[in-house]
Image (cartoon, grey):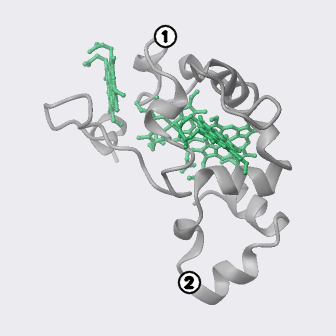
Amino acid sequence: MSKKVLGALFGAGLAAMALSTGAFAEEQKLAEFHVEMNGGCDSCHKDGSPSADGEYEFQQCQGCHGGLADMDAVHKPHDGMLKCADCHAPHDMNVGQRPTCEACHDDGRTPEKILGK
Ligand code: HEC
Ligand code: HEC
Ligand code: HEC
Ligand code: HEC
């Protein structure tokens, strides 16, 4: 958990919950985390409804986080190939949950091996 994320959680008033459960953000979906932090569904969806192809949402992710080409070695090779939500499904995955590779690669690669940590 980065300091930035911690800061955002404190800002959202979730720190008390995090500290009392000790389990932290594991219990919060990525979408809910963004809704509370950035003020609503519209931070990702146009007028609160999902687009048919996910392109609008992908543009929103990049508007705040930057594009795949400017990220680390796990992200870079997927530039032009994937959208963020192909790996970080906002309504299915929890904050702090690390996407895996085996849905698409069957050679046993992991983010840890690619990043050398
Ligand atoms: C962090 C960005 C983000 C936020 C915030 C967000 N969504 Fe989504 N949502 C997505 C993406 C991306 C998809 C495409 C499907 C997927 O990968 O989960 C999606 C899919 C959906 C779907 C289609 C069904 C499904 O689960 O696939 C609905 C309905 C939906 N969102 C409603 C909402 C509502 C209502 C809110 C506010 C409470 C919200 N979303 C907040 C990113 C977001
Ligand atoms: C191929 C799957 C994949 C795609 C596509 C992907 N990510 Fe990731 N992402 C990961 C993995 C694995 C990690 C954890 C390892 C790392 O930091 O690279 C991660 C980490 C992150 C983190 C850091 C979380 C933390 O712990 O601080 C952010 C933020 C993030 N991704 C945002 C994005 C955004 C925004 C996009 C689209 C522009 C995106 N990711 C696309 C797999 C993916
Ligand atoms: C309005 C700006 C904004 C939008 C839009 C946005 N994010 Fe974020 N996101 C943030 C901020 C701020 C944080 C917390 C600080 C950080 O980790 O960079 C965050 C955190 C994250 C994290 C790290 C959470 C963790 O597990 O530690 C991931 C992954 C992530 N966002 C993915 C996405 C994806 C995927 C989308 C698009 C579907 C998206 N974000 C859209 C601002 C945004
Ligand atoms: C949703 C599908 C999907 C997921 C999940 C995924 N990838 Fe990929 N990956 C692709 C596609 C598509 C390409 C481009 C075609 C190719 O080169 O095989 C690619 C290419 C790559 C490449 C460059 C080519 C190669 O095979 O060396 C690397 C490195 C890579 N991915 C690492 C990862 C890692 C690490 C993870 C897990 C964090 C991951 N991928 C998860 C779809 C995915």
Q: Name the residue at the left extreme.
A: 107
Near mark 2 (Cα within 10 A), the count class, few <14, some 14-19 or many ≥20, is: few
Task: Report the residue at 55% width, 17% height from top.
Answer: 69
Q: Amino acid at mark 2?
A: Gly
Task: Report the residue at 70% width, 64% height from top.
Answer: 6
- Between the C-alphas of marks 1 and 2, the distance is 39 Å
Judge by depth and name the residue closer to the eye, 84 or 45: 45
Say if 45 sits above or below 1 in the image: above
Task: Report the residue at 60% width, 52% height from top.
Answer: 30
Q: Dividing the picture into quarters, in which one does residue 78 lie?
A: top left
Where is residue 104 drawn, in percent x and y? 26, 28
Q: Amino acid at mark 1?
A: Gly
Say if 5 sits above or below 21 in the image: above
Quick one: label 1 or label 2, which is nearer the N terminus?
2
- Judged from the image, the secondary structure of the residue bearing numbered disc 1 is loop
Task: Find disc 2 in the rendering and name its residue.
Answer: 22
Task: Report the residue at 72% width, 50% height from top.
Answer: 34
Judge by depth and name the residue closer to the eye, 91 or 101: 91
Q: Is residue 86 left or right of residue 102?
A: right
Judge by depth and name the residue closer to the eye, 50 or 10: 50
Near mark 1 (Cα within 10 A), the count class, few <14, some 14-19 or many ≥20, is: few
Say if 34 sits above or below 45 in the image: below
Q: Is residue 17 left or right of residue 80?
A: right
* Residue 2 tag number: none
Q: Dividing the picture into quarters, in which one does residue 100 lie?
A: top left
Q: Are marks 1 and 2 in contact (CB under 8 Å)?
A: no
Q: Name the residue at the top extreme.
A: 80
Where is residue 5 drawn, in percent x and y? 68, 57
- Judged from the image, the secondary structure of the residue bearing numbered disc 2 is loop
Disc 1: residue Cβ within 8 A of ligand 4's nearest atom? no
Where is residue 52 drawn, in percent x and y? 60, 21
Task: Find disc 1 in the rendering and name its residue.
Answer: 80
